[in-house]
Amino acid sequence: MTENSQTKNWYLSLFKDFEARLNGERSKPVHALRRAAMDRFAQIDFPSLRDEEWRFTDISPLLKHSFSYSAKKEGMVPSRDDISRFLFGGFESHVVVFVNGFYSGSLSRLLPLPKGVVIGSLAESLKEDDGRISAHLSDQVGSGLDAFTALNLAFTLDGLYINVPGGAVVDRPVHALFVSAGDEKIISQPRNLIVAGKNSQIRLIEHYVTLRSGEYFTNSVTDVVIEGNAVVDTVRLQSENLEAYHVATTTAFVHTNGTYESHAVSNGASIYRHNLNVALNGEGASTTLEGLYLTAGDQLSDTHSMIDHAAPNCTSGEHYKGILDGNSRAVFNGKIMVRQGAQKTSSYQENRNIILSEEAKVDTKPQLEIFADDVKCSHGATVGQLSKESLFYLKSRGIGEEQAKLILIYAFASDVLKNIKEDEVRVELEKVLSTRFLKGI
């Protein structure tokens, strides 16, 4: 039996135990979706290097582990002091905390909200669901589910739920903090759903951190629904420990004149994979995707994005940068599809990488598929080292070599960081840069 099959059988057996512990929840509509997702999982395999979309990303180290599903335990709730280290100083925001995938009301803090806005636990909202949440989840069940998204839905219990009704503006950001804690070898699988009604606005920080050492697995799924003229601005920060595994799938559905912005920064996890899919489904929809990945040691970071221009007069821009050190590896695969009816499309894609060591490696693959004739599209990718001329210039002005390197790294990363709207978040990320590369970690 292959390692892939053994791991698959482990999760199939784990689901039986999980289902047996649900008691009355098995009669709820969402459980039919769980079972459908597990049926889908049983039909497919985990991806391997033979799969085109995974040919540069070896997940066999992840498949060696038999992770247990996260169970809600009061004893594992961290203290407020534990959480405070991950909050941005002087930053006024709604704070929503999840521990191993479960909402913690005692650690969360909501400021006054506009009428009708819901921010909190998906599990709690499902108890009073009028069918809209279940309908959205049911739309995700089908042949499009890969092994990780199917596994997430099969074990769905909790996650972040935000519903902003039409016309509402949430003027302070929502800081959703996902904390891995305890000493068990677990898989946590938050299922997040953000719905922005017509003419609404919201900013979200999706932040993954850890209070533990050792191996664990975060398998997260975030769906964003953006209705007409709504604006959703997200920052995704991944700072797991360097023994962890993190697979994330983010899907945004953007309707007429809606706007979706995504700023992603990752510096943690042994293996990190982010699947980012944006569907521009309505005329005039737009999206901007920006990201920065930092790798060192034996880390592997993989970003796979897909922007689907399915309607006319839509715009998209994508700008990802990577900084690699040690024996690390990064993958960027960005695809832009312009469908036949999507005339007047304007789109660009750019991936730039700096390698700080001889052993680090990047595989970058920008892609365009265009089936319309009235479009403006471009893409490009570069892989290089810090400029020797720039280093020489800075050193000739009395700046030490390490400080000179850091200045150039800052300058390289600033294109991405400067567009994060919250100053406090930007300052913390700049600290991450200096700490990581001055220490050579």
Image: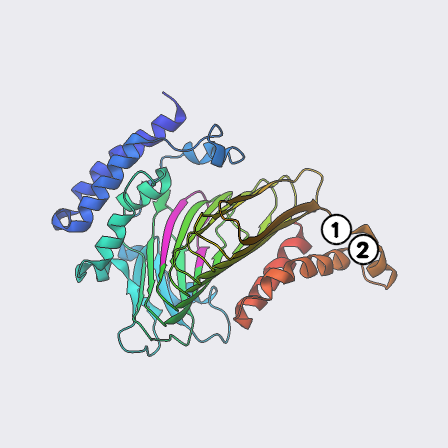
In the image, residue 437 lies at what x, y percent? 66, 54
In the image, residue 167 lies at what x, y percent? 33, 75
Q: Is residue 79 above or below residue 110?
A: above
Give the residues in magenta.
207-224
The type of residue carrying mark 1 is Leu
243 inside magenta stretch: no
In terms of image quadrants, where is residue 408?
Answer: bottom right
First of labels 2, 1 by sequence position: 1
Q: Measuring 62% from the left and 58% from the top, which residue is drawn there?
A: 433
Q: Measuring 27% from the left and 57% from the top, which residue is drawn there?
A: 74
Q: How is the image coloured?
A: rainbow
In terms of image quadrants, where is residue 48?
Answer: top left
* Residue located beneath label 2 in the image: 391
Which quadrant would the N terminus be assigned to in this image? Answer: top left
213 inside magenta stretch: yes
Q: Which mark is residue 386?
A: 1
Q: Is residue 372 visible?
A: yes
Secondary element at image label 2:
helix
In the image, residue 118 lies at what x, y percent? 28, 69
Discs 2, 1 touching: Cβ within 8 Å: yes
* Secondary structure mostly seen in the magenta stretch: strand
Report crowding for label 2: few under 14, some 14 to 19, many 20 or more residues within 10 A (C-alpha). some
Report crowding for label 1: few under 14, some 14 to 19, many 20 or more residues within 10 A (C-alpha). some
Number of numbered discs on residues:
2
In the image, residue 215 lies at what x, y percent? 44, 42
Q: Is residue 400 above or below residue 93?
A: above
Q: CA distance from mark 2 to mark 1?
A: 8 Å
Report whether 70 appears left or right of 210: left
Q: Is residue 322 visible?
A: no
The type of residue carrying mark 2 is Leu
Instruction: Please state which of residues 408 and 66 is positioned toward the viewer in this rendering.
Output: 408
Report whether 361 appears left or right of 282: right
